[in-house]
């Protein structure tokens, strides 16, 4: 009888466990998903390899720049914004090689950004690491400096007028830089660009900056020659520019001219800036274009890098009404970067488990998350990346996996699919709002045959970076007056 009683109890236990588990399964919410259009994205990878801007007029030199009449401030203006691929035909004939080239360039940039934070946190100036004074002696302007591993800089470009009368130039846009600069005659060592090199003697508003000026003292690397300020800016990929620091007129089409903008007139420039004449710094430091023109806000929408489409860079246009709003946080150590109040991540609608305050910017300058248009792939501290990846893998048991590619360790073979449903991925911000990413912004092709990888990567640095792949198709607005960042999908 005891054995029969025990068997009955055991049967009841298993029946209760089955019913309990079934109830939980019915009551548990299904993971939220997004559709990835595999066929469309693969067609785009093939298109970018054959796309020729010279034939397609993807970035016309005569393209108009226009006044933004919808600006609430009445002083807003817009300039066209194009991807790297729409400016010059790629030299790659294989998409996987193109991706590897992009990722190599991206890793170099990330190393440069994280090093800048590391130096600032430890109170070390670049001049203490490298004798810039020696490199910038007067005779240096007539002696070419040989670069190391220049792999190309810049992902998004616009056309800006420089000088009076204005000459139009392709310029790289960079939220991770402050110093504006352009290649100048006489050129001791210049890389090839699409436009004629800027000739200061042809401009009536060209004016050298003195060593005693506020602009010169704001440079991180500078020295003097004959009472005039010389500058140097170096980038993580081995590219650099050296020359005279000057003020000049900058123009944006019908919005008028802005006189007295401090910029570098580079006579020694090394790097592959994809035919651009120079760089427009959109960072938060005193020498950036945004600071010099006293912009209250600016925004951009980044088109897909494999697209020949375009969007705009807007100034003083405020936040769109439907923006996902997050705090814009400033670092006391590095004023260039725009930190955002990120609190967490979710996969499939479920928050990834991380310690409270994991992404906070510390008083020391360590930690935090920046929004950067020049970095491609979002970098997360290893603990956060591993948790995100593991959650994604857990919810994709039916997708066939394949080997990793470059810095990507989570890849899938979707060659037999035309579309797939994948777990939704979202950023969660201070204040309670969240940004849902389109599937194509986090599962991206790395070849033209159907290999897709999760487009996040781990970093050993305390700094996390939201890159441009995750920003594509979203208008990102920086409300500088009110310290807010807005994300507005489908506002390109």
Image (spheres, rainbow, N blue to C red):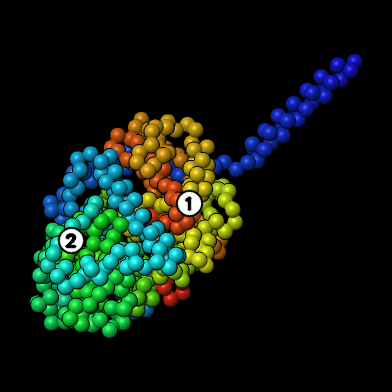
Instruction: Describe residue 367's horizontal placement relative to residue 254 as left or right.
Output: right
Task: Give residue 299's position: percent from left, percent from top.
Answer: 36, 66
Q: Residues within 10 Å of mark 1 (few under 14, many from 20)?
A: many
Q: Is residue 383 above or below residue 261?
A: above
The correct choice, above or below, for 22 with respect to 440 in the image is above
* Nearest to the observer: residue 65 or residue 94: 94
Give residue 450's quadrant in the image.
top left
* Residue occupying image coordinates x 52% and y 58%: 359
Residue labelled with disc 1? 381
Q: Secondary structure at mark 2?
A: loop
- In this view, the residue in front, 398 or 480, is 480
First in sequence, mark 2 or 1: give its number: 2
Q: Could you tell me residue 404's position as x and y percent?
A: 38, 37
Residue at the location (42% across, 56% down)?
465
Q: How many numbered tags mark residues here?
A: 2
- State left or right for residue 91 relative to residue 305: left
Q: Using the rendered image of the protein, determine whether residue 287 is visible from the camera's viewpoint.
A: yes
User: Residue at position x 20%, y 80% from top?
Assistant: 228
Q: Quadrant of the N terminus?
A: top right
Asked if the residues shown at circle 2 and circle 1 are in contact, with their CB atoms under 8 angstroms apart, the answer is no
| Image mark for residue 145 | 2
- Could you give the CA–CA distance between mark 2 and mark 1, rounded to whole angstroms? 36 Å
Choose between 105 and 154: the one closer to the eye. Answer: 105
> How far across and how far down the image is residue 221, in percent?
29, 70
At label 2, counting other C-alpha atoms closer than 10 Å, the crowd grade (few under 14, some 14-19, many 20 or more) is: some
Locate the C terminus and report the quarter of the image it occupies: bottom left
34 displayed left or right of 55: right
Helix, strand or loop for disc 1? strand
Q: Toward the viewer: 464 or 373?
A: 464
Quadrant housing residue 247 = bottom left
Numbered circle sitting on residue 191: none
């Amino acid at each position: 009888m005891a054995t029969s009683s025990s068997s009955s109890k055991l049967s009841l236990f298993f029946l209760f466990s089955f019913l309990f588990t079934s109830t939980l399964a019915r009551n548990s919410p299904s993971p939220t998903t997004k559709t990835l259009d595999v066929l469309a994205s693969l067609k785009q990878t093939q298109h970018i390899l054959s796309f020729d801007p010279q034939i397609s007029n993807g970035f016309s030199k005569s393209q108009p720049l226009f006044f933004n009449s919808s600006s609430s401030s009445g002083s807003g203006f817009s300039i066209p914004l194009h991807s790297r691929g729409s400016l010059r035909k790629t030299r790659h004939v294989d998409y996987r090689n193109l991706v590897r080239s992009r990722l190599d360039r991206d890793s170099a940039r990330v190393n440069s950004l994280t090093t800048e934070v590391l130096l600032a946190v430890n109170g070390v100036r670049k001049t203490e690491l490298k004798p810039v004074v020696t490199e910038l002696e007067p005779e240096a302007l007539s002696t070419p400096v040989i670069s190391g591993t220049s792999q190309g800089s810049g992902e998004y470009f616009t056309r800006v007028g420089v000088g009076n009368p204005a000459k139009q130039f392709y310029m790289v846009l960079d939220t991770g830089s402050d110093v504006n600069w352009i290649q100048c005659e006489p050129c001791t060592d210049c890389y090839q660009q699409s436009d004629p090199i800027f000739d200061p003697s042809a401009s009536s508003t060209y004016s050298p900056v003195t060593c005693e000026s506020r602009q010169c003292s704001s440079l991180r690397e500078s020295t003097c020659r004959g009472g005039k300020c010389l500058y140097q800016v170096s980038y993580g990929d081995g590219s650099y520019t050296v020359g005279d620091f000057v003020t000049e007129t900058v123009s944006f089409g019908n919005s008028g001219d802005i006189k007295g903008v401090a910029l570098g007139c580079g006579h020694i420039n090394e790097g592959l800036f994809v035919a651009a004449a120079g760089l427009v710094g959109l960072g938060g430091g005193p020498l950036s274009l945004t600071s010099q023109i006293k912009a209250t806000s600016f925004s951009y929408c980044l088109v897909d890098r494999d697209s020949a489409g375009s969007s705009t860079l807007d100034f003083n246009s405020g936040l769109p009404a439907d923006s996902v709003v997050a705090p814009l946080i400033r670092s006391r150590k590095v004023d260039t970067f725009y930190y955002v109040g990120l609190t967490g991540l979710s996969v499939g609608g479920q928050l990834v488990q991380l310690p409270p305050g994991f992404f906070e910017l510390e008083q020391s300058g360590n930690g935090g998350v920046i929004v950067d248009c020049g970095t491609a792939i979002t970098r997360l501290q290893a603990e956060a990346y591993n948790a995100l990846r593991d959650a994604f893998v857990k919810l994709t048991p039916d997708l066939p996996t394949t080997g990793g590619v470059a810095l990507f360790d989570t890849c899938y073979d979707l060659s037999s699919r035309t579309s797939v449903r994948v777990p939704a991925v979202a950023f969660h911000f201070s204040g309670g709002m969240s940004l849902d990413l389109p599937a194509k912004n986090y599962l991206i092709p790395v070849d033209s045959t159907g290999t897709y990888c999760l487009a996040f990567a781990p970093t050993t640095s305390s700094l996390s970076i939201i890159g441009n792949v995750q920003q594509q198709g979203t208008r990102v607005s920086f409300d500088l007056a009110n310290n807010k960042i807005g994300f507005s999908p489908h506002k390109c």
